[in-house]
Image (tube, helix red, strand yellow):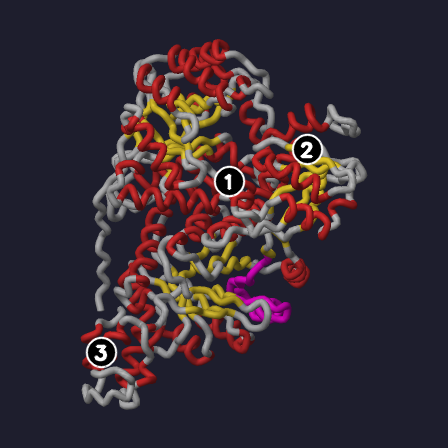
């Protein structure tokens, strides 16, 4: 809980020595409480004052790092309830559950090499969750050898210890069975200095368990929220986030951990949208993972910064020098809509994505980022003009006004065709305008 | 240290809006006085409802996965309506008059009115009617439908900031609900409702369509604009307190990804995320999505714990 000016004042020596630059300790205290000054400026501050002020200015949700090396993942450190208030900062880790299998190493290798590029982000398996089994210490070692952060899904404290000892230098996350007595797991996590998941039958028990773990010497904690169904889970998730931000209980100021059993797709959706920081997912296969990765990408996009595409010429289908050359902006939503619609027409195209600072067509034009000169310069830089022999460029209908300027700027016999305002009208445009022209109408 | 979470109380609430009148079994949405799904601290007299989308002519761009459950009735709206309600359990329907679009058959307003009448004759659930969305044709089609179906409480989709006067007039004259669509923009959503109120539309007969971005295609924009609209409404802004409708199916099934992986997951993820942001009327395409979402919503708003 942030301290008030008067609470801070009581922690100061009240000598009005002025060495901090303020006339009185009270004036300095007010600035401290507002976060506008640092306690370093008071040479006489007691250790108690430093501790109290430090705790008060700590982030509402602590950061926790799992794993080591390039694939290590840090979660937590969130500061808002609604993403539009600022942004969600730490994308939740999606860990894949590794069941015992004879071809374990081959499975891990395939997970390690899995990379899917989408809208400027690389989707990959963030970590491996390993349920306790006779072979699980070896499996854990095999996973960390491949650089994966590991979550230990324990069923007994002995089994947990065997796995954790084996990979203790790699900061594994220790996950006791939900509802287990914390004692043995907490001392293991404290001794090995590894992160620990705590759980509780209700919020109070959960927050208390987190405090107990802290007292046992565990520094990095994740909370496994109670909730027998989606409604109960959503309640817990919302209450934990609100409680943490309002600092109603120090035990709530930790990232949230969630297990997603096979077939629990809806639970994963609620977890990703509502504040879970680490999910272990049993389902394999793109049918589950692709929508979840994409949802995470959407929700954790900074709402103040539009998603941008890398400017350049993108091929839709297998275009040649007779295919249409379309021009649009690098706002990724615009790109996705245009490319999806072009694909639906079945006509191969070159799509030149011009750097318009991530704005949509009309906004970019109003802001002067999509003028004829600027578009022409950009087309030349990306050598879009060399991709086609017909010297015809198609611009979005909303910016028909730049067609003359663009023709002039391109020169060299280039012609500008004004396309439809909406990408969904590209099919009739190709049929009636492009196809009717002097270029080969290679529509299917 | 004990843990105390105070329930959040708000000055405003969501307006109750009833879809369907006359020969329809009415469906009411809205009325909630807290953040979406926060059943632990607010009251919700009505739960979100699910519409299935049917079309007047065979839908031109549906992929096989979503056509399959509709085999034999695509382009036969009365039969599709019966299947949607009797077999798939839709609370209401959205009839998209795609065939009236100049590029998709250019069917006349008269044809459109006949199709809507045939659907009304085949089922008793409320009906959302979506026009071709193309300038003046939209008004001609929806105005004729509104007149033909006077008193049935259709939801006319949609009026926008540039083009609302005709539809406002016919909605009032013939007793229909008007869907007010804005381009993922809270200010325009508010402005449009002010314009509609000035045009004598009772906002108790309107829905907000904030424009849906599907998963991976702008979902986050819709999500945040809906959260902001809901917060404004709860803060007491009556010009933003209409319930929200999301056309989930047409956006979710447009994604490239649904061709490669399971489209039902894609539609469910889009819809569930938007329910969390405050959507109360969800228009879907695949009956399996409806069944899965229905299960969660019934659990949420029913009394008992369920899985």
Q: Which residue is mark 2?
A: A417
Q: Position of residue A340 (x, y in %)?
A: 62, 38
Q: Nearer the viewer, mark 1 or mark 3?
A: 3
Q: Which residue is mark 1?
A: B214
Residue A320 picture location, percent across and down: 79, 39
Residue A27 circle label: 3
Q: Is residue A20 visible?
A: yes
Which residue corresponds to the image point at 68% horizontal and 42% vertical from the top-left? A351
Disc 3 crowd, CA 10 A, few/some/many (<14, 14-19, 20+): some
Q: Which residues are magenta?
A: A123-150
Residue that appears at 26% across and 84% down = A48
Would you say residue A76 sits in the magenta stretch? Answer: no
Q: Earlier in the sequence, mark 2 or mark 3?
A: 3
Do we see residue B74 in this rendering? no
Q: Nearer the viewer, mark 2 or mark 1?
A: 2
Mark 1: few, some, or many residues within 10 Å (few <14, many ≥20)?
many
């Amino acid at each position: 809980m942030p301290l008030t000016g008067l609470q801070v004042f009581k922690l100061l020596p009240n000598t009005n020595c002025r060495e901090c630059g303020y006339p009185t300790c009270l004036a300095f205290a007010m600035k401290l409480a507002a976060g506008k000054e640092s306690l370093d400026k008071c040479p006489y501050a007691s250790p108690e004052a430093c501790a109290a002020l430090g705790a008060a200015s700590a982030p509402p949700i602590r950061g926790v790092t799992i794993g080591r090396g390039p694939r290590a993942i840090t979660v937590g450190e969130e500061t808002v309830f609604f993403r539009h208030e600022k942004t969600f900062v730490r994308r939740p880790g999606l860990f894949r559950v590794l069941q015992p299998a004879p071809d374990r190493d081959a499975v891990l290798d395939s997970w390690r090499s899995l990379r899917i590029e989408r809208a400027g982000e690389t989707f990959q398996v963030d970590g491996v969750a390993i349920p306790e089994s006779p072979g699980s210490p070896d499996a854990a070692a095999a996973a960390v050898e491949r650089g994966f952060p590991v979550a230990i899904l324990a069923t007994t404290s002995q089994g947990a210890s065997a796995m954790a000892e084996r990979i203790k230098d790699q900061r594994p996350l220790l996950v006791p069975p939900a509802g287990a007595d914390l004692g043995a797991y907490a001392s293991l996590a404290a001794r090995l200095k590894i992160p620990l998941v705590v759980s509780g039958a209700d919020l109070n028990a959960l927050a208390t368990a987190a405090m107990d773990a802290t007292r046992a010497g565990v520094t990095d904690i994740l909370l496994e929220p109670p909730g027998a169904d989606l409604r109960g889970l959503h309640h817990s998730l919302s209450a934990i986030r609100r409680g943490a931000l309002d600092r109603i209980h120090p035990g709530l100021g930790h990232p949230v951990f969630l297990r997603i059993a096979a077939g629990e797709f809806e639970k994963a959706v609620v977890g990703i949208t509502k504040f879970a920081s680490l999910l272990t997912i049993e389902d394999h296969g793109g049918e589950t993972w692709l929508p979840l990765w994409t949802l995470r990408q959407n929700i954790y996009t900074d709402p103040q910064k539009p998603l941008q595409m890398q400017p350049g010429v993108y091929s839709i289908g297998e275009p040649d020098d007779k295919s249409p050359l379309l021009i649009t902006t690098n706002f990724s939503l615009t790109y996705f809509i245009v490319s999806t619609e072009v694909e639906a027409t079945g006509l191969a195209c070159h799509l030149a994505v011009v750097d318009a600072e991530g704005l949509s067509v009309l906004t970019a034009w109003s802001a002067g980022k999509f003028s004829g000169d600027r578009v022409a310069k950009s087309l030349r830089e990306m050598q879009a003009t060399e991709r086609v022999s017909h010297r015809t460029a198609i611009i979005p209908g909303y910016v028909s006004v730049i067609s003359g300027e663009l023709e002039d700027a391109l020169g060299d016999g280039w012609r500008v065709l004004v396309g439809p305002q909406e990408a969904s009208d590209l099919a009739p445009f190709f049929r009636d305008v492009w196809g009717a022209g002097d270029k080969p109408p290679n529509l299917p | 240290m004990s843990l105390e979470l105070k329930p959040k109380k708000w000055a405003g609430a969501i307006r109750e809006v009833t879809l369907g009148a006359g020969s329809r079994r009415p469906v009411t949405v809205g009325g909630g006085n807290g953040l979406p799904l926060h059943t632990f601290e607010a009251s919700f007299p009505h739960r979100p409802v699910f519409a299935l989308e049917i079309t007047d002519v065979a839908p031109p761009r549906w992929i096989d996965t979503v056509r399959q459950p509709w085999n034999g009735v695509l382009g036969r709206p009365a039969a599709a309506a019966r299947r949607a309600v009797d077999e798939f359990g839709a609370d209401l329907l959205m009839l998209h008059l795609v065939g009236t679009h100049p590029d998709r058959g250019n069917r006349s307003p008269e044809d459109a009115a006949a199709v809507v009448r045939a659907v009304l004759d085949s089922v008793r659930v409320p009906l959302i009617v979506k026009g071709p969305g193309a300038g003046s044709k939209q008004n001609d089609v929806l105005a004729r439908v509104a007149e033909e179906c006077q008193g049935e409480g259709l939801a006319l989709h949609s009026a926008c900031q540039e083009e609302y006067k005709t539809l406002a007039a016919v909605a009032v004259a013939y007793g229909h609900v008007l869907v007010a669509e804005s381009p993922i923009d809270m200010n325009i959503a508010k402005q449009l409702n002010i314009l509609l109120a000035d045009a004598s539309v009772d906002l108790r007969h309107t829905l907000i369509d904030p424009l849906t971005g599907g998963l991976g295609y702008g979902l986050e924009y819709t999500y945040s604009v809906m959260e902001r609209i809901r917060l404004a409404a709860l803060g007491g802004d009556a010009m933003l307190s209409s319930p929200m409708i999301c056309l989930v199916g047409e956006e979710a099934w447009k994604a490239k990804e649904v061709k490669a992986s399971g489209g039902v997951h894609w539609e469910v993820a889009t819809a569930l995320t938007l329910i969390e942001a405050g959507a109360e009327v969800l228009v879907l395409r695949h009956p399996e999505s409806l069944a899965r979402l229905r299960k969660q919503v019934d659990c949420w708003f029913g009394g008992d714990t369920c899985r």
